[in-house]
Amino acid sequence: MSAREVLHRWRSTLISLLVVLPLGVWRPELGKSALLLLGENILMVMGILPPVFILLGLFDTWVPRERVAPHMGEDSGLKGTTLSVLLGACSAGPLYIAFPIAEVMLRKGTSLRNVFVFIGAWSTMRIPMILFEVQNLGAVFGLTRYFVSLVGILTMALLLDRMLTETEKSSIGERFRAE
C-alpha cells in the first residue's frame, strides 16, 4: 500500500488531528479534552467494526447469492420490502454499520429499493427507539412517528428506485457483483 493510499484511508483521522493539535497549542486544556475525545471515538469505532466485518465476511462466504436474491431481489415484492424493514428495525449499533451490511446485501442480489428501505429503517425505525418514544413521549406520538417514518422510507425508496435508470442500476449491481 502506497503512502497516498494510507493518507486517503486515514484522511478523516488526520483532518481531526490537524484541527485538534492547533487547538491544543492555543488552548491546552481544550486541546487535551478534544484529543481524549478523539481517542475514545477511534477506540469505540475500532471495537465495533472488526466484529462486524468478521460476521459480514462469514455471511458473504457461507450464504450463497441464490439464497438471498429470491427473498430480497428485484422480484421479491412486498416480501423483500418487509424483510428489509424488519432487518433495519431490528438492528443494533450506529448507522455507519449499516453501509457495509448494505454492500454485502447488494452483492447477494438484494434490489437497490430494498437496500434503500433497509438503510432508512436502520436510521429511523429501530425497535428500541419506538419503545423509548412510546414510554416517554406517549403512544400517539411514538406510533405516529413510526408510521410516518415507514411511509416516508417506502416513498423515498420507491422514488429513488424509479429515478435511477436501468443502466445506472445495472452499473451499480455489476460493480458490487464484480468485487
Image: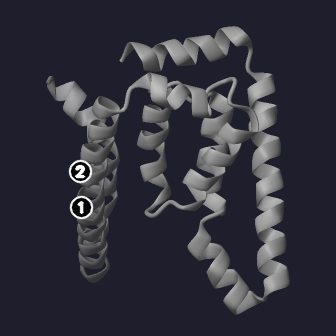
Which is more toward the observer, 156 or 88?
88
* Residue drawn at the location 68% of the way across and 33% of the way down: 113
Neighbourhood count class around disc 2 (C-alpha, 10 Å): few under 14, some 14–19, many 20 upward: few
Residue, disc 1: 47
* Residue drawn at the location 60% of the way across and 70% of the way down: 127
The answer to whether residue 84 is above or below residue 35 is above
Neighbourhood count class around disc 1 (C-alpha, 10 Å): few under 14, some 14–19, many 20 upward: few
SS category of the residue bearing label 1: helix
Task: Give left or right: position of 127 versus 41.
Answer: right
Q: Position of residue 12 (x, y in %)?
A: 35, 47
Instruction: Tell me the quadrant of the picture where the N terminus can be found.
Output: top left
Q: Position of residue 48 (x, y in %)?
A: 29, 59
Which is more toward the observer, 46 or 142?
142
Kind of residue indicated by mark 1 = Gly
Q: Which mark is residue 50?
A: 2
Q: Quadrant of residue 79?
A: top right
Instruction: Tell me the quadrant of the picture where the C terminus can be found.
Output: top left
Q: Position of residue 152 (x, y in %)?
A: 81, 52
* Residue drawn at the location 45% of the way across and 61% of the way down: 94
* Residue drawn at the location 25% of the way across and 53% of the way down: 51
Kind of residue indicated by mark 2 = Pro
Q: Quadrant of residue 65?
A: top left
Whether label 2 touches label 1, CB < 8 Å: yes
